[in-house]
Amino acid sequence: MDWTASPWFLAFAGLSAGFVLGFVTRANHFCTMSALERYWYAGDSRGLRTWVLAAAAALIATQTLQALGWVDTASSFYVRSDFAWIGAIAGGIAFGFGMALVGTCGFGALVRLGGGSLRSLIVLLVLGLAAMSTQKGLIAQARVALSDAYALDLSPMGGQSLGAIASFWSGSDVSLAVAAVVAGGMLVWIFSDSSYRRHTGSIVTGLIVGLVIAFGWSATTYASQHSFDVVQIEAGSFVVPIADTMLQVVTFTGVLPDYGVGLVIGVVAGAAACALWKRDVRWEACDDARELGRHLTGGVLMGVGGVLAMGCTIGQGVTGISALAISAPFAVISIFIGARMGLAYLIEGSPLEAFGSIRRQPAE
């Protein structure tokens, strides 16, 4: 029997990809929030360069597969014709602030949960509920009125892919050239630091994360071409899929788990396997009500903000960039601004300090 024809193909593909992501990122301490904090407060850019390398690797692999006809990012929601710029900016800031309050993003919370963090379990439950409400519930009414209603229609240009827009204005298909320029610029910055070039583990981690995202594009594209059902073409995001996973756990409507649900479960399983292998399982809970309140607030902000921005640090920061979505830089920069404001609030006493000078200390 051809296992790719199975209705469980997407779930198992996501489970496999998520397992690799969870194992590798926990083993090598891949965390966007930690990377930003160390960059801003300790002058250590290694974690940030690894994250950018993941995006660059995903971009190169995805665009190459698309040129070969094995990936169809044009059918994904990342490059749909309507560009909700208000959601990308406001949602990104909210997500980033919430990420700072929690100390990690939705993806990081899944990795921590695999190691025994009950705080992360609380965050994920709240994030999932907030994402559901923002996508389909009461908060969705405000989202439609305040963000979607002001979206820019880019259908005359072929959607909101940077490659499509550049091709529209140039009169010829320059998508690969645009991808090469963007990826080249990222790689130049990544490897401009000679010390980073010696960190093989970090480089391998970034490459694996990027290639897993490209695998997601190819798996869901393949399924969409061989299935009679409607398949959402995706690669990796950790906001709405967390909500979908919660729904799959508590109810069953006859719809089988998709790639995103498999990915979420796989990340927890992979992180748990790594924690067991390293004997690094530690049961952790909130120390007091104040810490619990901070995690609850952060979960809400990430759930609402992630839906508004159509992604998270992985969803927009790696997956969105791999599709050359113009929403990606808006969302990512906004997430960084929100995270800086959140850190300023926690460390310096006021989010307004984020707009002052960043006092860096020498890296250890």
Image (spheres, helix red, strand yellow):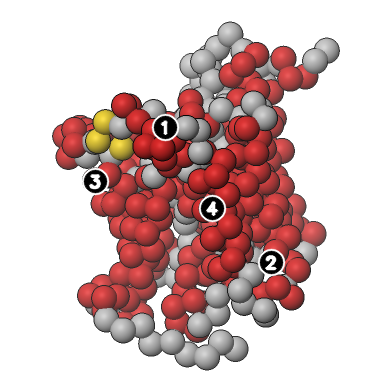
Position of residue 283 measured from the top left corner of the image (x, y, whole percent): 61, 62
Position of residue 273 measured from the top left corner of the image (x, y, whole percent): 74, 52
> Of circles 4 and 1, which is in front?
1
**In the image, what residue type sits under mark 3?**
Ile
- The Cα atoms of the two marked residues, 3 and 4, are separated by 27 Å
Viewer can see residue 226: yes
Residue found 38% across the figure and 87% down from its top: 359
- The Cα atoms of the two marked residues, 4 and 1, are separated by 18 Å
Which residue position holds label 2? Answer: 202
Position of residue 234 measured from the top left corner of the image (x, y, whole percent): 53, 33
- The Cα atoms of the two marked residues, 2 and 4, are separated by 23 Å
- The Cα atoms of the two marked residues, 2 and 3, are separated by 34 Å
Q: Residue furthest right?
A: 1
Q: Do the residues labelled 2 and 3 touch (CB within 8 Å)?
A: no
Which residue position holds label 1? Answer: 171
Q: Do the residues labelled 3 and 4 touch (CB within 8 Å)?
A: no
Q: In this view, does 227 lie to the left or right of 89?
A: right
Viewer can see residue 268: no
- Indicate which disc, 2 or 1, sits on the residue closer to the N terminus: 1
Helix, strand or loop for disc 4: helix
- Of the numbered discs in the image, which one, if any, rests on residue 288? none
Residue found 52% across the figure and 38% down from its top: 175
**In the image, what residue type sits under mark 1?**
Gly
Q: In this view, does 72 lie to the left or right of 277?
A: left
> From the viewer's perspective, is residue 362 above or below residue 320?
below
- Indicate which disc, 3 or 4, sits on the residue closer to the N terminus: 3
- Of the numbered discs in the image, which one, if any, rests on residue 86? 3
Crowd tier of the residue under label 3, counting other residues whose Cα lies within 10 Å: few below 14, some 14–19, many 20 or above: many
